[in-house]
Amino acid sequence: MKLARIALRNLARNRRRTLLSLLVIAAGSAALVLTAGFVRFSFAGLEDAIVRGGLGHLEVLPAEAAGAALTERGQRPALDGWPEIRRTIEDVPGVRGAGAVVHLAGVVSKGDRSIPFLGVAVEPDRERRMRFELKLRGGEDLPAEAPAEGEDRVLLGLGLASALGAAPGDVVTALVVTTGGTLNAVDLAVAGVVTTGLQDLDARLLKMHLASAERLLETPRVSSLVVGLEDGGATDALRARIAERLAAVRPPLAVLDWRTRAPFYRQVRGLYSGIFVFLGAIVFVMVCLSTSNTLLMSVMERMREIGTLLALGTTRARVGLLVVLEALWLGLLGGLLGDLLGLALAMVLGASGIRMPPPPGAVDPIAIALDVRAVDLVGTVGLMLVVLGAAAAAPVVRTARLRIVEALGHV
C-alpha cells in the first residue's frame, strides 16, 4: 500500500506529461465504451426486428423440412394436426402464443403486370397476441377475423406494390400451384403496403390471412407454427421444454429458434464483433506505445534517484514494481476518466436524434443510440490495466538492467 502511494506521488511530479497520458488513455477507453454500446444496441435492435417482424422466437415444423430455407419450402404445407400441437405448445408456461403459418409462392398480377411473389399466410389475431410489429407504409393491417369467400385481402411489400402499381383499395390476382398440382387463382383486395426493412424481401413479399391461403391452396394444412415467448431471454430453455412435450408426435417435429432461422443475424453479429476486436487491437497498440514511451521517459529522468535506491539496498524487483504501479495508476485513472467521457458522449448522442443512412439493402435509416452497460465500463478499465501493465514492460526491463554506478553518474 505504501509503495502504491509513492507511485501515485511520482505521477504528480510531472503533471503535464501525466495529464497527456491520461487523455490518451481516456480517449481510447471512451472509444471502446461507445463502440461496445453501439454494437450491443445494433444487436438488440436487429434481434427485436427479426423476432417481432414475424419470425417469432421459435418455429415448430416437420423435421424433414427443418433444413430447408424459408424460400425453399414453397407451397407445400405439411404440418398435420396443428391445432392440437398448438394447444400443447400454448400450455407451456412462458409462451405468449403460437400462430399457424403457410409459406407459398406464385405469381401476382394487376392489369398487364405479373410478378413472382413469396407469400406468407398468417393468423393476424395471433400475431397481435404475440406482439409482432407491422411496418405499414399505407393502408391498414389485415382484419383479425377470417375473411369470407370473395372478400380476401392482402398486404403487399413496398417494392412489390411499386412494381405492380398497386395501392390500398386496388385488387390483385394471386396465381399458385395447389397441393394437388393444379393451378388456382384468387382475387385479393390490397389492404395495405408494408416493409420488412429489407429491399429484396419487400420486392417479393405478399401477406394474407390463413383462411385466404386455405382457399388458394385448397388445403387446411399449414407449413409451421410460429411461437412468441413472454421473455426472449428464455428462448433456449423453452425450446427444450417444447421439444420435450412434442417428442411423441409422429411424424417427428423440429423446434427451431430464431437464430437458426436467421443466418443474416449471425453474419451481422460476426461482422460487428470483428470490427470491435479490430478497433480494440488498434486502441491497445496506440495506448501501449504512447504510455510505454511516457513511462520510459519518467524512468530516464529519475535515473540517479533509482540508482540511489539501489545503492541503499532496495531490490530491483521492488523498483520495477514501483514502475508497474505507476503504470497501473495511469490505467485505472485513465480508464475511469474514459468511462465518464464515454457515458457523457453516449447521452449526448442519444439525445441528438441523429439518424444514419440505411445499411446496404435496407429501407429505414438507423437512429444513433447506445446501450452502454456496467460490464462495458468495468471491462474497459480492466483492459486499460492490462494495456498499461504491458506498456510497463520496457521500463521495467530498463530498470532491471541498470548498473548502479552508471545510474549515480547519470546527468
Image (tube, rainbow, N blue to C red):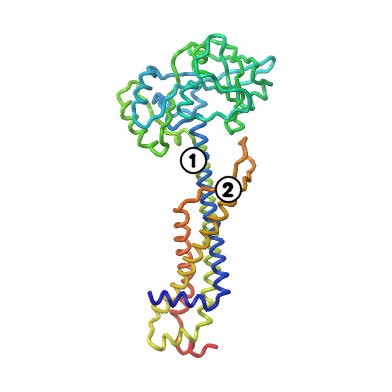
Determine whether label 2 and label 1 are within 8 Å by CB.
no
Residue at image point 67% right, 24% down: 163
Outermost residue toward the left in this view: 248
Mark on residue 327? none
Q: Quadrant of the N terminus?
A: bottom left
Disc 1 residue crowd, few under 14, some 14–19, many 20+, Cα 10 Å: some
Q: Quadrant of residue 170?
A: top right
> In the image, which is nearer the foreground, mark 2 or mark 1?
2
Up the image or down, 132 lies above or below 360; here it is above
Residue at the spot of label 2: 350
Residue at image point 30% right, 24% down: 248
In the rendering, at what x and y percent does residue 277 appear?
A: 51, 53
Residue at image point 40% right, 24% down: 62
Mark on residue 266? 1
SS for callout 1: helix
Viewer-proximal residue among 128 and 287: 128
- Distance between the Cα atoms at labels 2 and 1? 26 Å
Disc 2 residue crowd, few under 14, some 14–19, many 20+, Cα 10 Å: some
Q: Number of numbered discs present?
A: 2
In the rendering, at what x and y percent does residue 367 appear?
A: 60, 43
Disc 2 or 1, which lies upstream in sequence?
A: 1
Up the image or down, 78 lies above or below 325; here it is above
Q: Is residue 390 left or right of residue 21?
A: left
User: Disc 2 marks which amino acid?
Assistant: Gly
SS for callout 2: helix
In the rendering, at what x and y percent does residue 12 appear?
A: 51, 76
User: Disc 1 marks which amino acid?
Assistant: Arg
In the rendering, at what x and y percent does residue 308 appear?
A: 44, 88
